[in-house]
Image (cartoon, helix red, strand yellow):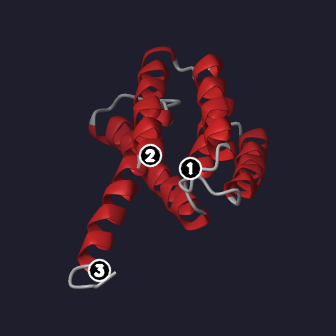
């Protein structure tokens, strides 16, 4: 739980930077990455060693998407790598799809409803909302499925 809360706090800070400056500072991302790696090496059960494979897989996948389409910035790829380190495979997929849908909704709202043409949007806030929503849904469904369970 400590890792998830600290990840949400870091994502909120990165969202502020992305909204204000359209940039994701490397110092914050790398500092949090070092914290996550050192926390996982210390033997915590929250961060599983399997998550290193998630980081390599999703980092490569989103890095390739960024390189081919130029629609995703490298700061977004780094943030997705951090999320992949904290979450399992299916959760990262859900977060990526949810964040993309949130971004599309923002673009449609601005371009069609408000008649303001946006060429790019800060994507880290979309990732933050998707991460928080996924964690909230996990808590809700885990609590509902464990009601009356002796375990």
Tag shown at residue 86: 1
Which quadrant of the rendered structure holds the C terminus? Answer: bottom left
Pointer 2 and pointer 1: residues touching (CB < 8 Å)? yes
**Residue 18 percent location from the top left of the image:** 49, 23
Residue at image position (46%, 33%) is 11
Determine the residue positioned at 48% across, 30% down: 122
Q: Earlier in the sequence, mark 2 or mark 3?
A: 2
The residue pinned by badge 3 equals 145
Disc 2 or 1, which lies upstream in sequence?
Answer: 2
Q: Residues under labels 2 and 3: Cα distance? A: 21 Å
Crowding near pointer 3: few (<14 within 10 Å), some, many (20+)?
Answer: few
Q: Which residue is mark 2?
A: 4
Q: Cβ–Cβ below 8 Å for labels 3 and 1? A: no
x and y percent of residue 53 in the render? 75, 57
**Secondary-structure class at tag 2:** helix
User: Is 120 situated left or right of 68 in this image?
Assistant: left
**Residue 50 coordinates in the image, percent (x, y):** 70, 60
């Amino acid at each position: 739980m400590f890792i998830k809360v600290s990840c949400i706090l870091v994502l909120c800070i990165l969202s502020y930077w992305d909204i204000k400056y359209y940039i994701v500072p490397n110092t914050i991302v790398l500092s949090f990455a070092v914290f996550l790696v050192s926390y996982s090496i210390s033997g915590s059960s929250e961060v599983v060693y399997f998550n290193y494979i998630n980081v390599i897989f999703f980092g490569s996948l989103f890095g390739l998407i960024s390189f081919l389409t130029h629609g995703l910035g490298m700061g977004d790829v780094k943030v997705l790598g951090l999320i992949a380190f904290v979450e399992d495979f299916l959760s990262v997929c859900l977060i990526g799809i949810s964040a993309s849908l949130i971004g599309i909704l923002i673009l449609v709202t601005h371009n069609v409803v408000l008649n303001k043409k946006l060429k790019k949007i800060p994507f880290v806030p979309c990732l933050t909302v998707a991460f928080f929503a996924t964690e909230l849904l996990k808590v809700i469904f885990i609590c509902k499925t464990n009601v009356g369970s002796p375990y």
